[in-house]
Amino acid sequence: ARSFCAIFTYFTINQESTSLTLKRYAGLTIICTLLFSRSFTDYMTSGLENPLSYFLVGLIILLVNRDKFESTYLKLASIFILLALAFLNRFDFAVLLLPLALYITFVKNTLFSTIKASTIGILIIGSWFIFSTIYFGAPLPNTYYAKLGAAYPSIEYIERGLNYFSVTFTKDPITLLIIISGIILGLITRSGLSRALSIGMIFYTLYILKSGGDFMQSRFFAILTYISIFNLILFIRHF
């Protein structure tokens, strides 16, 4: 599974620059850093949603990154279906993927074409909410009501969030280094995709802080580590 994610990430981003040997080896070196991220590797085979998150987000970036192909209705609809599935996989990915969705809507395409293509994705999300409300009695998962809906003071959530960052820095510093590098280099890269990903990562980092983190060490940082690798390779590609 780890090898699949590494190869998938590499060939997704370097599909147009595989003839550039230096960039290829630099990209492979960056991918190898994933193996030193406990956040990425520990939850790869944990039975949680992480592997599916990697797969869905990777496919989305693959489709958006393929600039040489025309943005057809089928391609755009596929992207929004994948966005809908990623959202249903983890609801808080709405924070992470919103800037990317806005980039696709207002930069890569017209508003009308986006609304038309996003219809299926919206129907998928709406159908789940209806089913969840009828079957489970609530549209959102129990963890939302138990954690974020518990009405604890905001300062307590932030304190727990800071502790979550602190533990990760102590136990898994490579992960935070990869994430910080990915955000910074993504913002300065001449790529709208990289900037959208970086902004989403910043939003998600703030969400982690505001929500108090998680009881599983570094779990929320796993997807950020994965996306950071995309940004680092995109930076090399545009360097």
Image: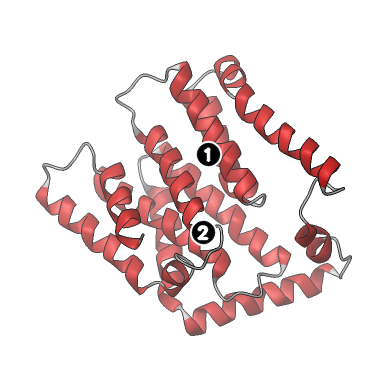
Q: Is residue 179 above or below residue 52?
A: below
Quadrant in which residue 158 is drawn: bottom right
Q: Where is residue 145 in the image (x, y as percent from the top left)?
A: 83, 59
Specify few, some or many for label 1: CA neighbours under 10 Å numbering under 14, 14-19, or 20 or more. Answer: many
Q: In this view, does 94 lie to the left or right of 156?
A: left
Question: What amino acid is at disc 2?
Answer: Asn
Q: Quadrant of residue 116?
A: top right
Q: Which of 94 and 155 is in front in this view?
A: 94
> SS for tag 2?
helix
Residue 143: x and y in percent read 76, 62
- Coloration mode: secondary structure
Q: Residue 83: horizontal and vertical position, in percent?
A: 56, 38
| 3 versus 175 height, above or below | above
Which quadrant, please, contains the N terminus? bottom left
Q: How far apart are marks 2 and 1 (CA)?
A: 19 Å
Residue drawn 44% across and 70% down?
A: 175
Between 37 and 192, the residue placed more toward the observer is 37
Query: Which is more N-terminal, label 1 or label 2?
Result: 2
Disc tally is 2
Res. 100 mark: 1
Which residue appears farthest toward the front when viewing the image?
Answer: 135
Would residue 40 appear left or right of 82 to someone viewing this image?
left
Residue 87 in percent (x, y) is at: 62, 44
Residue type (three-letter) at the residue carrying disc 1: Leu
Crowd around label 2: few <14 · some 14–19 · many ≥20 (10 Å):
many
